[in-house]
Image: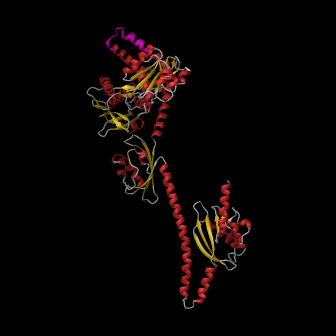
């Protein structure tokens, strides 16, 4: 505070020493700064030179004193000058004071609002001009007049130039500030002219449309985005250029992101402003909320009806089973079998409702994906329409991948059987699996049927939505969607270029790398059993039979993971789960035991098999969502 006061005193003293009068009024026409020559020049009382003094009061004082000559309507004269001041326009003028002195007034607006005025005593200059006029009879009257006008014009021009330079500086600072702000916004802001060419961009296009470049000014829509994306954007841009605002969403072909785009025609009719935002998370949250509400509905339905409905189905199945064994005539036997089939279908539907409404968890483990795809095709082929061809194509990296085989196979079977039902006759179904680059795995099911309708593309993953005229439950695609999201992936529905539906599951591509595992277990028998499981999964094992021994081995070069009993003889395995290395704990304690709840890592319940161990190791290594607690 002391340095600020000293600086203010220093500034005030400096302003008092300059030969010109100065005043600064803020946007509310209140005095902010003035110097002593300002008070002396206009002989102002002290109350009119204090910060906060009203400009209107100052003008009223000067008008009343006759500063501006006789006034027929003093109040009108005051109002005119106050109104002129509120326009904050650059100005230069010269006027004579009642005491005969001449002053020039040079005013300029300030960026923060308000204006500064500098008053210069030009009495001597005017006197010299008068002497020159009186003593220079040889100079023509016209030359003298022009010289005086030129001098006044030069002074006014200098004032105008100063105002323009300040305005230019303000504009430059404002433009730099605006550009910095727009480049910080997590959206792409741009302008496109009538020739579909970018004239402005905040350089954020790659953050919204992956694979594009930041410098797109001067490029056309197709040059900036590529032909496929430009084709989807062009109709909307064309309407915007004709003056019709647009707000729409597109799916970026390369990344699967959902992009919301707002197009606003500019006022001059020379193009349109563009605001593009990545709303993938919003759309996913909206879909997840919709799915969750429908799952809650399913849960309420099943919780209220499942018990009674299950009892009824049990009775029906029992009675029909007895009838089937009673040696009925062929016609009656067919009816019994039909009733049994319908009852079993009811049981299956109850199970599916329970699955969609109940909690889910992943069980990731190393998977030979080509073998899983071959097995999936073998399971699906007996259920396909006669004459339908199912082919499998794979372009995958070598070695096992970390996946949940049960969920993935269930999803693929759902998609294959849906495709078979959609074709309503013999056709061709293709299951394609390939690495998509940037750490993704694409599994695509296509068919040669009629493709998805517009409504199915919008609502296909909603629980209970079906196009099978009452023959489907509407839960298949919804379950595939939920399982894919749980695995950290995306699901996309569209139609193939050569007709037919196409469904793509995109999952994280995680290789099952060989681990070097520190196994800490104080029971020799259990340690040997778990060691065999680990080596069977292809991992190297270093053994420790106590907490102290394990702690001494945690800094071994190449060690990648710790598998420890929760309760070791000389301490707790929790001391090994310090975050330095991925860790999995084993225990026979019940799931709700407080010791288990305190674990910051996956916990395996003893006994466990090799698959469950592989899933826990994958969770620790890759941060998946499964939990055995």
Q: Residue at the location (41% across, 41% down)?
A: 257
Q: Is residue 543 left or right of residue 107?
A: left
Residue 494 is one of the magenta-drawn residues: no
Q: Is residue 206 left or right of residue 579?
A: left
User: Residue 604, how many percent across, how many down?
Assistant: 47, 21
The image quarter containing residue 131 is bottom right
How was the colour assigned to the protein in this rendering?
secondary structure
User: Residue 183, how many percent across, how many down?
Assistant: 47, 50
Question: 320 or 332, which is in the foreground?
Answer: 320
Question: 154 or 539, which is in the foreground?
Answer: 539
Q: Main secondary structure of the magenta part?
A: helix
How many marks overall?
Answer: 0
Q: Is residue 358 left or right of residue 378?
A: right
Question: 607 or 288, which is in the foreground?
Answer: 607
Residue at far top of view? 326
* Residue 375 in sight here: yes
The image quarter containing residue 535 is top left
Q: Residue at the location (67% across, 67% down)?
A: 16
What is the magenta range?
Answer: 316-331
User: Residue 452, how many percent across, how many down?
Assistant: 36, 36
Question: 375 or 337, which is in the foreground?
Answer: 375
Q: Is residue 594 above or below residue 98?
A: above
Residue 326 is one of the magenta-drawn residues: yes
The image quarter containing residue 59 is bottom right
Q: Is residue 433 above or below residue 107?
A: above
Residue at far left of view? 387
* Residue 244 in sight here: no
User: Residue 282, how many percent across, how many down?
Assistant: 48, 40
């Amino acid at each position: 505070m002391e340095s600020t006061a000293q600086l203010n005193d220093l500034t005030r003293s400096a302003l008092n020493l300059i030969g010109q009068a100065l005043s600064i009024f803020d946007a509310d026409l209140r005095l902010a700064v003035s110097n002593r020559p300002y008070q002396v020049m206009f002989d102002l009382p002290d109350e009119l030179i204090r910060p906060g003094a009203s400009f209107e009061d100052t003008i009223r004082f000067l008008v009343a004193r006759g500063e501006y000559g006789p006034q027929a309507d003093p109040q009108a004269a005051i109002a005119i000058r106050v109104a002129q001041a509120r326009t904050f326009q650059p100005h230069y003028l010269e006027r004579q004071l009642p005491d005969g002195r001449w002053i020039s007034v040079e005013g300029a607006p300030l960026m923060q609002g308000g204006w500064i005025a500098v008053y210069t005593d030009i009495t001597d200059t005017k006197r010299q001009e008068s002497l020159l006029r009186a003593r220079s009879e040889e100079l023509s009257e016209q030359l003298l007049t022009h010289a005086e006008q030129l001098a006044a014009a030069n002074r006014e021009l200098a004032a105008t130039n100063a105002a323009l330079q300040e305005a230019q500086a303000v504009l430059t600072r404002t433009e730099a500030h605006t550009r910095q702000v727009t480049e910080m916004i997590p959206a792409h802001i741009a302008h496109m002219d009538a020739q579909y060419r970018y004239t402005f961009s905040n350089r954020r296009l790659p953050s919204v449309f992956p694979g594009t470049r930041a410098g797109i000014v001067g490029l056309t829509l197709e040059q900036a985005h590529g032909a496929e994306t430009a084709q989807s954007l062009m109709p909307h841009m064309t309407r915007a250029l004709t003056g019709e605002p647009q707000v729409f969403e597109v799916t970026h072909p390369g990344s699967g992101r959902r992009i919301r785009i707002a197009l606003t025609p500019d006022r001059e009719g020379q193009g349109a402003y563009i605001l593009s935002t990545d709303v993938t998370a919003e759309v996913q949250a909206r879909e997840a909320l919709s799915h969750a509400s429908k799952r809650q509905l399913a849960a309420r339905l099943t919780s209220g009806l499942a018990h009674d409905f299950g009892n009824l189905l049990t009775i029906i199945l029992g009675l029909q089973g007895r009838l089937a064994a009673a040696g009925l005539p062929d016609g009656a036997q067919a009816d019994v079998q039909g009733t049994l089939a319908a009852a079993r279908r009811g049981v299956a539907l109850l199970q599916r409702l329970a699955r969609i409404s109940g909690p889910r968890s992943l069980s990731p483990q190393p998977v030979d994906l080509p073998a899983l795809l071959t097995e999936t095709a073998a399971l699906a082929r007996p259920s396909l329409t006669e004459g339908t061809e199912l082919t499998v194509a794979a372009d995958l990296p070598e070695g096992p991948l970390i996946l949940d085989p049960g969920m993935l196979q269930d999803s693929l079977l759902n998609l294959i059987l849906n495709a078979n039902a959609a074709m309503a006759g013999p056709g061709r179904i293709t299951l394609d699996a390939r690495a998509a680059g940037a750490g993704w795995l694409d599994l695509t099911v296509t068919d040669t049927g009629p493709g998805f309708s517009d409504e199915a593309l919008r609502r296909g993953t909603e629980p209970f939505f079906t196009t099978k005229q009452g023959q489907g439950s509407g839960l298949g695609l919804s379950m595939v969607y939920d399982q894919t999201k749980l695995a950290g992936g995306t699901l996309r529905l569209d139609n193939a270029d050569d007709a037919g539906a196409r469904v793509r599951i995109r999952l994280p591509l995680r290789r099952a790398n060989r681990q070097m595992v520190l196994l800490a277990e104080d029971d020799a028998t259990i340690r040997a059993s778990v060691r065999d499981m680990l080596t069977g999964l292809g991992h190297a094992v270093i053994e420790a039979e106590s907490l102290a021994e394990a702690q001494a081995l945690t800094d071994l070069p190449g060690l990648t993971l710790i598998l420890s009993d929760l309760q070791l003889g000389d301490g707790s395995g929790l001391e090994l789960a310090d975050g330095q290395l991925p860790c999995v704990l084993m225990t026979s304690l019940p799931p709700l035991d407080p010791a288990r709840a305190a674990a910051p890592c996956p916990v395996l319940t003893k006994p466990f098999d090799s698959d469950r161990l592989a899933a826990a190791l994958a969770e620790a290594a890759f941060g998946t969502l499964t939990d055995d607690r």
